[in-house]
Image (cartoon, grey):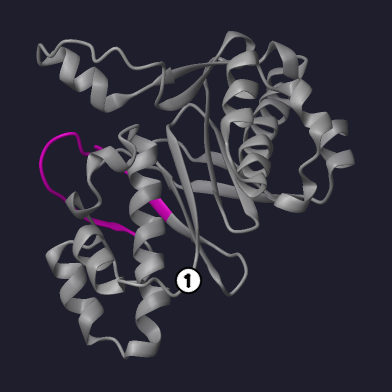
Amino acid sequence: MTLRSAPSSATVWWARTSSADDRLLRLLDERERSRNARLRHQADRDRHLLGRAMARLALARVAGCPPEKVSFDLVCRSCEDKARAGAEPGGREPHGKPVPSGPALGWEISVSHSGEWVVLALTEGPPVGVDVERVSDARDLEGLADYTLAESERAFWKTLPPAERTGAFFGYWARKEALLKATGLGLSGGLRRVGVSPPHEAARLVEWTGGGGPGAVWLTDLDREEDYRSALAVLTDGEVEVSVRSLGDTAALLRG
């Protein structure tokens, strides 16, 4: 008999980039504002701004504190693994997955954006990863598949009618990146190391080659518009109840 963890919950917030407003900049810390200013394109600045503001507002709500009191430590799992193996620090500025600290310590978040959507996932306790991908006609889909898909995934993907391959590819990608983000490895963990079920089946982890894989994972697809694929991963062996919420405009964001 296998003992399973108690059920947990995850809250997923969606916002369109049209909700971005410079008034939200006050919620970012100095490092985040500096990074936002360095982004060359307005669309990138809007997505970054919304992601960071949503994170602070959602965490402030559950932690019972002002958004300005929410802080984060940036944790790069790959760098930590290299350090444990004896590698010298690379001298890079802080980077990696944002881990809430201060009043929001104990909560986990993950943020993703693509096209005109920004998504935030929030859990208390188990690590979480979320990803959204806009389905687009990539110039070199075959090359991207070679970089992204494990051998078994690519073999199945090649059997699909050509008209279905683009959507299926981004479905694979969203599931795999959500898993990698939940572990803290991110894309540096290697997309081909992760094998997931085909897009027409319920989302699940099939294989993980090499070390660093999760002991247990709960994985599901998230519904968005037809031209998007999205997935949520929570590192738990129990069931996860997902609540989905939408932020319609900047006024709603500022009200919390």
Quadrant in the picture for residue 213:
top left
User: Circle 1 — which element?
Assistant: loop
Mark 1 — residue? Answer: 136
Residue 171 pos. (x, y %): 40, 66
Crowding at mark 1 (Cα within 10 Å: few <14, some 14-19, many 20+): few
Quadrant in the picture for residue 88:
top left
Q: Is residue 256 at least partly visible in the picture?
A: no
Quadrant in the picture for residue 189:
top left
Residue 74 pos. (x, y %): 44, 19
Question: Which residue is painted at 22% across and 86% down in the image?
Answer: 159
Residue 223 pos. (x, y %): 58, 65
Q: Specify the quadrant that holds the N terminus.
A: top left
Q: Nearer the viewer, residue 252 or 206?
A: 252
From which residue to which does the magenta span run?
204-219
**Secondary structure mostly seen in the magenta stretch:** loop
The residue under label 1 is which amino acid type?
Answer: Ser
Q: Is residue 185 above or below residue 202?
A: above
